[in-house]
Image: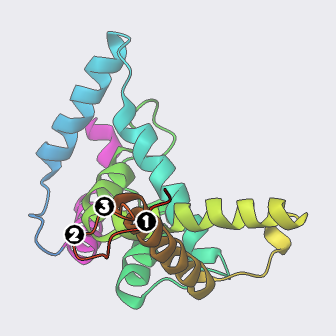
Amino acid sequence: IEVAFASGFSSLRRFNDVLRHVSPDHAPYTADQIAGAARRVLRAAARRLDVAFIRIRMRRAAEIRAARVDAHWQVPAPQESVMTAIVAYLDDTDHALIARDMPVVGQLDAAILVDAAMDTLRVELDDYAEFCRFRHAEAARIGLASPTLSTDRAHWRRECEHELLLERQLRRVRDNRYGENDDAPAGFRIR
């Protein structure tokens, strides 16, 4: 693993600078901590155990990229800043803390950053996933290809609010039993 840190402490400093940006309260990592994490991943892989940590975080990284470039999804400034920092780190392979082409652990450093950013980005990414499902369903409903549908975050929010209001109304109707009100006058009787 020590070979992975070929670019030295400048890469570790850069990694920790990005970490501080995406998660200000997170303590910086030492080279020993990163190397220890890499050894644990390698040991698990050697025992043929599934090491999902990197794979899942890289899937989240792909979601971050998609949300950033989607013209119909306007990411709020604080989350945009975090997303930009992560994508810039991912794209700068020359200064990666761990060489990207290293088997098994090549994206561990990026996965750690994505994981650290999830407290800030989880709600945004979950909302974006819901928006994508909504957009896809709306496009299918009207017979368009999903990318050609002109809908945006504001429209999606309004539709979510309408759906919530409808659900509340339906719940009130289900919970209200008509005719059981003690204050209501007695009904007509036919003899």
Type of residue at label 3?
A: Met
Q: Which residue is mark 3?
A: 118
Image quadrant assignment for residue 13: bottom left
In the rendered image, residue 13 lying in the magenta stretch gets the answer yes
Count of marks overlaid on the render: 3
Return the x and y of residue 36 as percentages of the image width and height: 16, 35
Crowd class of label 3 (few under 14; some 14 to 19; many from 20; radius 10 Å): some
Residue found at x 49% / y 79%: 161
Q: Residues within 10 Å of mark 1 (few under 14, many from 20)?
A: few
Task: From the image, give the main secondary structure of the stretch colored magenta.
Answer: helix
Q: Amino acid at mark 1?
A: Val
Start-end of magenta stretch = 1-23
Residue 173 badge:
1
Label 2 – label 3 distance at C-alpha: 53 Å
State the residue at coordinates (58%, 78%). 159
Give the amino acid at mark 2.
Asp
114 or 130: nearer the eye? Answer: 130
Q: Position of residue 12 (x, y in %)?
A: 24, 61
Q: Residue at x 65, y 83 (%)?
A: 152
> What kind of element bears circle 1?
helix
- Depth check, front residue: 18 or 9: 18
Residue occupied by mark 2: 182
Q: Residue 64: in sight, yes or no?
A: yes
